[in-house]
Image (cartoon, rainbow, N blue to C red):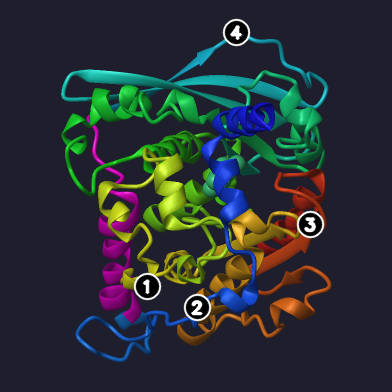
């Protein structure tokens, strides 16, 4: 008996925090609290918002401000200088299909500088300028071959379909580590952010990296930056959504299985919760967000409002049935409600009329799309393939 107890203790001690909490999480729809969500179309002063003018001048800025203060922290936009230098360090794995540009992007502010690396593949076939897809990568670093083996960044398939594609590693702007995340742009370029309750954290820092990649695309003669897609999976999917709320240059934003603090509604408290995520990853969101640990009902916002900030640009959300931790239903509901800005304000044909339980195939609307597939938490070729059908229609 004693041995058994010891064994239990050992297993318990070695389970990562997230795995322990995944077992304690609520996966029972009957235990989800009744949803009371802030209204997208009523301003803080009680004004009813019905026009593009009022949405853009009043309500959108209010919602943006709420997320910046209470959830993600500020992504600073200022710097003194940006420069691009081509390096030649690794062999191009697709010499027939593409030219590889390994770009060192150096940003200077108040005499300090930081260099991040962007890997960009430009198709050899076809006519420039090419539409571009950027992946925020928190997985193994390119050129680690496992990226393409896992279908996580299917460079060759994207090239064959006429896209230029790029990625940068999260670590080159902010390490994904609670102790060291500030050792990138935060302490180097924006040290004043470090003590603020709404200061820049890792998710925002990765978004800053995506914006610098966009700075490179817009001046590149072979890239058509007006046809750009920002893609992120899971933690990078959370980051992609916040990035696009900050930076209107992205034509499509695709968040794959981004879950809590991404596309999923927090107030459902289904799967991963605010307390669990803030405990396991204290370096992702700002300090203010910790006030809502175990108190989602007091949040003055929910994630449908984050999605609304991306309108009228295109938004794509995807879930997996085996990824209950990310609350697929909460991701869909959030998209369904958030897209009301697309339909009611911007008159886009983007109303999700299907109930979550009745979804049997991808839903691709004028400016918004969703799919849910079988299987586990991962960015697979299956996801890419369905997403690319949506992207092709948007970029037509
Ligand atoms: C999990 C985390 C999720 C998600 C995921 C990932 O451990 O709880 O919020 O971000 O990691 O990024 O793969």
Separation of disc 3 and disc 4 at Cα?
33 Å
Give percent across and percent down for residue 248.
42, 56
First to last magenta residue range: 55-80
The N terminus is located in which quarter?
top right
Secondary structure of the residue carrying tag 2 is: loop
Determine contact: label 3, label 4, CB under 8 Å.
no
Relative depth, front residue between 328 and 114: 328
Residue hosting label 1:
297
| Mark 3 residue's CB less than 8 Å from ligand 1 | no
Secondary structure of the residue carrying tag 1 is: helix
Residue hosting label 3:
386
Judge left or right: residue 374 versus residue 366.
right
Relative depth, front residue between 257 and 78: 257
Separation of disc 3 and disc 2 at Cα?
33 Å
Q: Earlier in the sequence, mark 3 or mark 2?
A: 2
Mark closer to the observer (3, 4): 3
Q: Earlier in the sequence, mark 4 or mark 2?
A: 2
Q: Quadrant of ligand 1?
A: top right
Determine contact: label 2, label 1, CB under 8 Å.
yes
The answer to whether residue 206 is seen in the rendering is: yes
Separation of disc 3 and disc 1 at Cα?
35 Å
Give percent across and percent down for residue 147.
72, 28
Residue hosting label 2:
33
Secondary structure of the residue carrying tag 3 is: helix
């Amino acid at each position: 008996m004693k041995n058994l107890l010891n064994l239990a203790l050992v297993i318990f001690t070695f389970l990562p925090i997230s795995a322990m909490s995944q077992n304690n999480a609520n996966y029972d729809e009957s235990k989800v609290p009744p949803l009371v969500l802030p209204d997208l179309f009523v301003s803080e002063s009680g004004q009813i918002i019905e026009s593009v003018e009022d949405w853009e001048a009043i309500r959108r800025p209010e919602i943006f401000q709420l997320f910046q203060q209470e959830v993600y922290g500020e992504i600073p936009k200022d710097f003194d200088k940006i420069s691009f230098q081509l390096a030649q360090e690794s062999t191009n794995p697709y010499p027939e299909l593409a030219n590889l540009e390994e770009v060192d992007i150096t940003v200077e502010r108040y005499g300090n500088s930081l260099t991040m690396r962007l890997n960009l593949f430009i198709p050899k076939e076809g006519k420039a300028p090419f539409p571009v897809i950027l992946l925020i990568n928190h997985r193994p670093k390119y050129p680690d071959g496992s990226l393409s083996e896992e279908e996580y960044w299917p460079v060759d398939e994207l090239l064959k379909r006429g896209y230029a594609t790029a990625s940068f590693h999260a670590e080159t702007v902010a390490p994904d580590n609670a102790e060291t995340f500030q050792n990138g742009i935060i302490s180097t370029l924006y040290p004043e952010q470090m003590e603020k309750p709404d200061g820049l954290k890792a998710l925002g820092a990765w978004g800053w990296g995506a914006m610098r990649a966009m700075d490179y695309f817009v001046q590149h003669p072979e890239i058509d930056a007006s046809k750009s897609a920002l893609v992120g999976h899971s933690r990078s999917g959370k980051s992609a959504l916040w990035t696009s709320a900050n930076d209107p240059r992205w034509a499509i934003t695709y968040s794959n299985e981004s879950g809590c603090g991404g596309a999923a509604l927090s107030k459902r408290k289904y799967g991963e919760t605010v307390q669990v995520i803030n405990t396991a990853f204290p370096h992702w969101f700002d300090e203010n967000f910790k006030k809502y640990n175990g108190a989602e009902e007091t949040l003055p916002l929910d994630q449908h409002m984050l999605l609304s900030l991306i309108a009228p640009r295109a938004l794509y959300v995807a879930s997996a049935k085996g990824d209950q931790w990310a609350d697929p239903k909460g991701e869909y509901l959030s998209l369904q409600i958030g897209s009301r800005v697309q339909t009611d304000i911007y008159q886009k044909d983007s109303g999700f009329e299907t109930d979550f339980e009745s979804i049997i195939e991808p839903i691709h609307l004028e400016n918004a799309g969703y799919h849910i597939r079988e299987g586990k938490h991962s960015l697979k070729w299956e996801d890419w393939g369905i997403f690319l059908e949506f992207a092709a229609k948007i970029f037509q």
